[in-house]
Image (cartoon, rainbow, N blue to C red):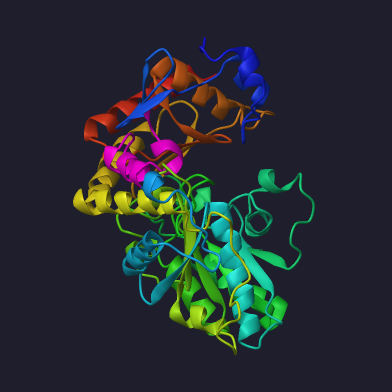
């Protein structure tokens, strides 16, 4: 039992968690280093998802901690509403240099959810500035995830995240999901089938006319269970957006900073969107930071007649926080110095080889992988969807000393980019033993 007593646990309402069950049998971590978490008794737990897709350089990096401490002593906070500080410019410059094509301006926020809502507001503001204020419709995708703010939930396509909150934004529609088990089961990397699903945007244009402002998709859907794009899908979606003068937003909160073997997944797939959202790995998860990278064309459209006027009436108190920027600079240095984006490609090969060996394990319905990420779909317990996945995360933690990410009945794996082959083998072997114990 955890040393954190029951009374202390009661006050905290955990997100995306069955709280009553958790507090009866809590999974609490107290320390982290490298590829491992440690519980309050010192038990070592292999981290199978780099925190929550964010600790890409592994845990406990002293360079990041030192940078944060130094920054807090020098400049603990500075507003970026009509003021600024040196590090926010440097982080923006480095991110713009990493981004593909002409994406060269960065707007900061604090999370992936805020980044998604910011990108949607940029899209609406862009078309109004261009004299096309009728373009107000936003297009997401079924099984898409863009955070939990109202804008991101509206364009998101995960029913469990939406059903309790009413109609959300009204001028929203969705492309079909890119996943089809009948045609794609046990694919390695990008499935051969499904590029034609991008053509559904033409149907939405036929329905809604020239009212569509933007399409937002994840290049690889992460929270829905590592759904790689079919071969040619993103290219066809880019072409459709160009054909109909629609902005294309890539949500790279999970796929950015090496997860797909490059700075951004857009580089891996050879498709340049009009905006990229980012968060998580930009600071290795140590301090919250997120943002949107946009093209000069989009940025310049917001220019006002008089130079004293505000261009974009949006922002957050902690946008470009100096401590977060210090963490980001230290993190980007680690990625570059240790060649972690390139190393991700080796991890992809190890992970693909290991995880697909589970094809005949109990309850496995499908396996997918792309970049340094993989997912295992479990056949649900009849009448109780999600129950088997929940049993898997509990058994992994208590029986196998590993930490997994489970969404419904899907196990997701996404180790840090410092992982060795032995870590991957231990992780997948642990998952196999868990599968054999499921009921």
Q: In the figure, is residue 169 to the left or right of 32?
A: right
44 is higher (above) or lower (below) than 164:
above
402 is higher (above) or lower (below) than 327:
above
Nearer to me, 303 or 361: 303
Q: Is residue 69 magenta?
A: yes
Q: Where does the magenta region start and end?
A: 46-70
Q: Quadrant of the C terminus?
A: top right
Residue lying at 40% horizontally and 63% vertically, measured from the top left = 231
Would residue 57 be visible to someone looking at this image? Answer: no
Residue lying at 65% horizontally and 88% vertically, measured from the top left = 131
Quadrant in the picture for residue 132? bottom right
207 is higher (above) or lower (below) than 406:
below
Question: x, y percentage for residue 63?
Answer: 27, 42
Q: Is residue 271 magenta?
A: no
Quadrant in the picture for residue 415? top left
Question: x, y percentage for residue 382?
Answer: 65, 28
Question: x, y percentage for residue 141?
Answer: 60, 60
Q: Residue furthest right?
A: 166
Q: How many marks?
A: 0
Question: x, y percentage for residue 398?
Answer: 46, 16
Would residue 75 be visible to someone looking at this image? Answer: yes
């Amino acid at each position: 039992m955890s040393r954190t007593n029951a009374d202390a646990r009661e006050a905290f309402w955990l997100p995306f968690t069955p709280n009553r069950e958790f507090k009866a049998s809590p999974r609490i971590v107290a320390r982290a280093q490298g590829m491992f978490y440690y519980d309050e008794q010192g038990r070592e737990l292999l981290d199978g998802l780099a925190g929550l897709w964010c600790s890409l350089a592994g845990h406990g990096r002293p360079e990041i901690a030192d940078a944060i401490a130094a920054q807090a002593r020098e400049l603990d906070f500075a507003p970026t509403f009509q003021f600024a500080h040196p590090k926010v410019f440097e982080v923006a410059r480095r991110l713009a240099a990493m981004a593909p094509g002409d994406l060269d301006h960065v707007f900061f926020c604090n999370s992936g959810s805020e980044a998604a809502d910011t990108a949607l507001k940029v899209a609406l503001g862009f078309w109004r500035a261009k004299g096309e204020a009728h373009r107000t419709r936003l297009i997401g995708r079924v099984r898409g995830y863009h955070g939990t703010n109202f804008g991101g939930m509206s364009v998101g396509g995960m029913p469990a995240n939406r059903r309790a909150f009413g109609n959300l934004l009204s001028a929203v529609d969705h492309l079909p999901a890119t996943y089809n088990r009948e045609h794609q089961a046990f694919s390695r990397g990008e499935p051969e089938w499904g590029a034609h699903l991008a053509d559904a945007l033409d149907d939405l244009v036929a329905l809604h006319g020239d009212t569509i402002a933007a399409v937002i998709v994840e290049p690889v859907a992460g929270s829905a269970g590592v759904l790689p794009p079919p071969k040619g899908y993103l290219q066809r979606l880019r072409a459709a957006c160009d054909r109909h003068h629609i902005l294309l937003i890539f949500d790279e909160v999970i796929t950015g900073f090496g997860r797909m073997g490059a700075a951004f997944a857009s580089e891996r797939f050879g498709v340049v969107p009009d905006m990229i959202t980012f968060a998580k790995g930009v600071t290795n998860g140590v301090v919250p930071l997120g943002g949107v990278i946009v093209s000069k064309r989009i940025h310049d459209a917001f220019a006002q007649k008089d130079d004293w006027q505000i261009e974009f009436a949006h922002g957050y108190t902690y946008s470009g926080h100096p401590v977060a920027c210090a963490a980001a600079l230290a993190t980007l240095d680690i990625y570059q110095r240790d060649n972690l984006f390139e190393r991700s490609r080796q991890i992809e090969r190890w992970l693909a080889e290991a995880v697909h060996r589970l094809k005949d394990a109990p309850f496995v319905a499908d396996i997918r992988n792309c970049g340094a990420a993989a997912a295992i779909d479990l056949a649900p317990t009849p009448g109780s969807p999600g129950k088997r996945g929940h049993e898997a995360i509990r058994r992994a933690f208590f029986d196998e000393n590993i930490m997994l990410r489970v969404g419904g009945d899907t196990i997701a794996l996404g180790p840090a980019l410092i992982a060795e082959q032995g870590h991957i083998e231990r992780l997948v072997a642990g998952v196999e033993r868990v599968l054999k114990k499921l009921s």
